[in-house]
């Protein structure tokens, strides 16, 4: 018969800071430099980083608010908020009950979900050509 041994772990729960705010801001600065120098985009999943209560808000406060705010309505609403640093976006996805299901810092010229997809553009072109033909015009 095999015997199972239980191992005890000391787990502490509290409001102690993780001290991840400043390193994360340095990571965002590095990503912004890469965007500018190499056109390399970066996405940071804020929900995958250990943060103490209030640290996510501290990150958003440090990033500030920019001039642009965009919304997308798909399986639930999504919000794309430019920070005070152009090229740095806070992207928040909600479910239908308006609970946050994802929060990201996206370092990009334009967030990926806001860009028109090639397939969608092709479909739009075909619809426009059909409409022009129906209106008696030539698609060319």
Image (cartoon, rainbow, N blue to C red):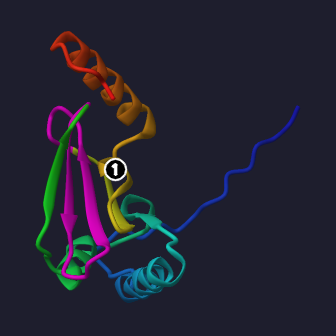
Give the camera-side residue of 88 and 37: 37
The mark total stands at: 1
Q: Is residue 48 left or right of residue 1?
A: left
Tell me if residue 98 is in the magenta stretch.
yes
Which quarter of the image is occupied by the C terminus? top left
- Residue ID for mark 1: 115
- Magenta-tinted stretch: 75-99
Which quarter of the image is occupied by the N terminus? top right
Q: Reply above or below: 98 against 48.
A: above
Q: Give percent across and percent down for residue 19.
A: 39, 86
> What residue is at 24 percent from the left and 33 percent from the top?
74
> What residue is at 18 percent from the left and 32 percent from the top?
96
Give the camera-side residue of 17 and 98: 98
Q: Is residue 11 left or right of residue 131?
A: right
Element type at mark 1: loop
Tell me if residue 95 is in the magenta stretch.
yes
Q: Reply above or below: 37 against 39.
A: below
> What residue is at 30 percent from the left and 22 percent from the top?
129
Q: Give percent across and percent down for residue 45.
A: 42, 61
> What residue is at 14 percent from the left and 40 percent from the top?
98
> Residue 82: which quarter of the image?
bottom left
- Graded by Cα atoms within 10 Å as few (under 14), some (14 to 19) or many (20 or more), the crowding at tag 1 reads few
Q: Give percent across and percent down for residue 116.
A: 34, 44
Give the camera-side residue of 8 and 38: 38
> Residue 57: which quarter of the image?
bottom left
Q: Is residue 64 left or right of residue 55?
A: left
> Residue 104: which quarter of the image?
bottom left
Q: Give percent across and percent down for residue 39.
A: 50, 73
Q: Is residue 95 left or right of residue 121?
A: left
């Amino acid at each position: 018969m095999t015997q199972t041994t239980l191992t005890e772990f000391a787990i502490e729960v509290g409001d102690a800071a993780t001290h991840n705010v400043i390193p994360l801001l340095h990571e965002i600065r590095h990503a912004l430099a890469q965007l500018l120098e190499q056109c390399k985009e970066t996405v940071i999943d804020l929900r995958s980083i250990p943060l103490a209560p209030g640290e996510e808000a501290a990150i958003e406060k440090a990033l500030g608010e920019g001039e642009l705010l965009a919304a997308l309505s798909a399986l639930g609403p999504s919000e794309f908020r430019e920070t005070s640093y152009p090229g740095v976006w806070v992207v928040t996805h909600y479910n239908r009950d308006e609970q946050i299901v994802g929060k990201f810092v996206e370092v990009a010229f334009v967030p990926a979900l806001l860009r028109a997809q090639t397939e969608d553009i092709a479909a739009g072109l075909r619809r426009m050509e059909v409409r022009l033909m129906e209106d008696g015009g030539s698609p060319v």
